[in-house]
Image (spheres, rainbow, N blue to C red):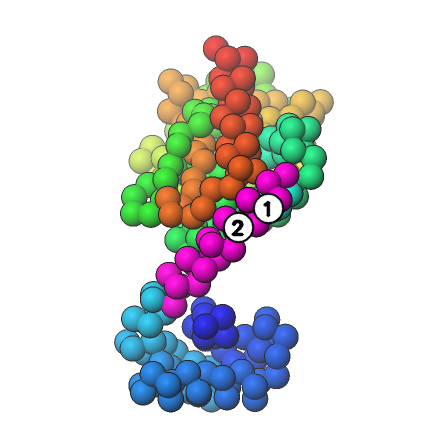
Amino acid sequence: MQYFLTVARLEHVTEAARSLHVTQSSLSKTIQRLEEDLGVPLFDRVGRKLRLNDSGSRFLLRAERALFELEQGKQELSDESSPEYGTIEMAVNTASMLPNILREFRKKKPNIQFHVQMLTTEEMIAHLHRGEIDFCLSSPPIEGGDIACQIMYIDPILVAVPKGHRLAERSCVSLTELKGEWFVGVKKGYGTRDLVDSICKSAGFEPKFVYEGDEPARILSLVEAEIGIAFIPGTARHSREQVVYLQVDNMELVREIALLWHKSRYMSRAAMAFREVVVDYFETLSKQNT
């Protein structure tokens, strides 16, 4: 089943074999035996590339559910035998507050490990639906189906400009005043970028980006170097001598930060402790900013 899931997701024998650390011939024979057992082909083959057919797509849903339940049973037994150990699997599309959260969690649960991935919103949703992660820290919130969503914080998005910029003496700015500016930011697909694009479009313009990356921490360095200006979440604000932060008039631009989890995924005692740390962190942050 694991071989089938990997091939179904990658749709390429060579890449799947590499991911599974098996030979291509062994992987191909395993998939062939599965199809013989089921009595139907699961893939359409074009060279080494595979495409799930209708039968394969239906079987994939069942296989994911079956392995999901087996994994939940394994985690539940592990939690009973070693509640103070284990690993929190987490995905984020916003990471500015993550170091503080992880530091607080490590103080409370020093023996619990964590594994964090920075993903686009679309990638994060896919991992969530498959039940592969304990939590997502996401902006925007995602609700519905098997995803549970708890809003944690309303975060104003600021405009960061270099100290010598024409707007640097201002404390606030309207979106329409930014129409002719050059921007630096993360790529499309990340929550804050998609939100900014949408709201700017409603204000009558599309931001012109001279840099689009997947490392949010680099953005302020580019602003400081006068490459462009940037939309920066309030939680990602850092004091820099050469960067000035402006509020957007009338609080037109804010984002919601939410904690997400799969409703049916077993929540270990470590995972529950982690959720408490996240809730406490954002409650303290909200009090500090009121």
Rendered image quadrant of residue 205? top left
Whether residue 59 is situated above or below residue 40 in the rendered picture? above
Q: Amino acid at mark 1?
A: Ser
The residue stretch that appears in magenta: 63-84
Q: Which mark is residue 104?
A: none
Whether residue 170 is situated above or below residue 216 in the rendered picture? above
Farthest front residue in view: 81
| SS of the residue under disc 1 | helix
Image point (61%, 22%), residue name: 244
Farthest top residue in view: 290
| SS of the residue under disc 2 | helix
Whether residue 2 is situated above or below residue 133 in the rendered picture? below
Horizontal and vertical percent position of residue 55 = 29, 77
Give the residue number, with chain letter if any, for mark 2: 77
Q: Amino acid at mark 2?
A: Leu
Between residue 230 and residue 177, name the one nearer to us: 230
Rendered image quadrant of residue 250? top left
Q: Which mark is residue 81?
A: 1
Q: Residues within 10 Å of mark 1 (few under 14, many from 20)?
A: few
- Tell me if 81 is positioned left or right of 247 in this view: right
Badges 1 and 2: C-beta atoms under 8 Å apart?
A: yes
Image point (49%, 84%), residue name: 30
Image point (65%, 28%), residue name: 108
Horizontal and vertical percent position of residue 217 = 64, 39
